[in-house]
Amino acid sequence: MEEFFKMVSNYGFPIVVSGHLLIRLEPIIKDLQRSIDMQTLVIAKYMDVDVDKLRQIKKV
């Protein structure tokens, strides 16, 4: 906890809080991206869209 207070005094509260939130939320954001990708593939298969074409479009 002492290290946290040193960081706040050196870098400022907004920067420390932003960094902390970014570190905590990054895994959640990655999981959400995977879920969106899976749902896109499921919808594409349901709509008879070529999944390979969809993957190529996504990489662009």
Image (spheres, rainbow, N blue to C red):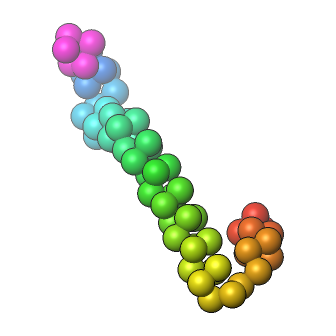
> Magenta span: helix, strand or loop, mainly?
helix
Q: Quadrant of residue 24?
A: top left
Image point 46% across, 51% down: which residue?
Answer: 31
Closer to the camera in the image, 45 or 58: 45
Q: Quadrant of the C terminus?
A: bottom right
Residue 15 % position (x, y): 34, 37
> Which quarter of the figure is the N terminus placed in?
top left
Q: Count the numbered circles shown.
A: 0
User: On screen, 50 above or below 39?
Assistant: below
- 13 or 38: nearer the viewer: 38
Q: Of residues 37 and 3, which is closer to you in this image?
A: 37
Q: Residue furthest top?
A: 2
Which x, y percent locates residue 28?
40, 48
For image coordinates 52% across by 70% down, the residue present is 39
Residue 51, image quadrant:
bottom right
Q: Is residue 21 visible?
A: yes
Say above or below: 4 vs 55. above
Splitting the image into 4 quarters, where does residue 4 fall? Answer: top left
In magenta segment, residue 35: no
Q: Is residue 58 left or right of residue 12?
A: right
Q: Which residues are magenta?
A: 1-5
Q: Position of residue 32 (x, y in %)?
A: 44, 57
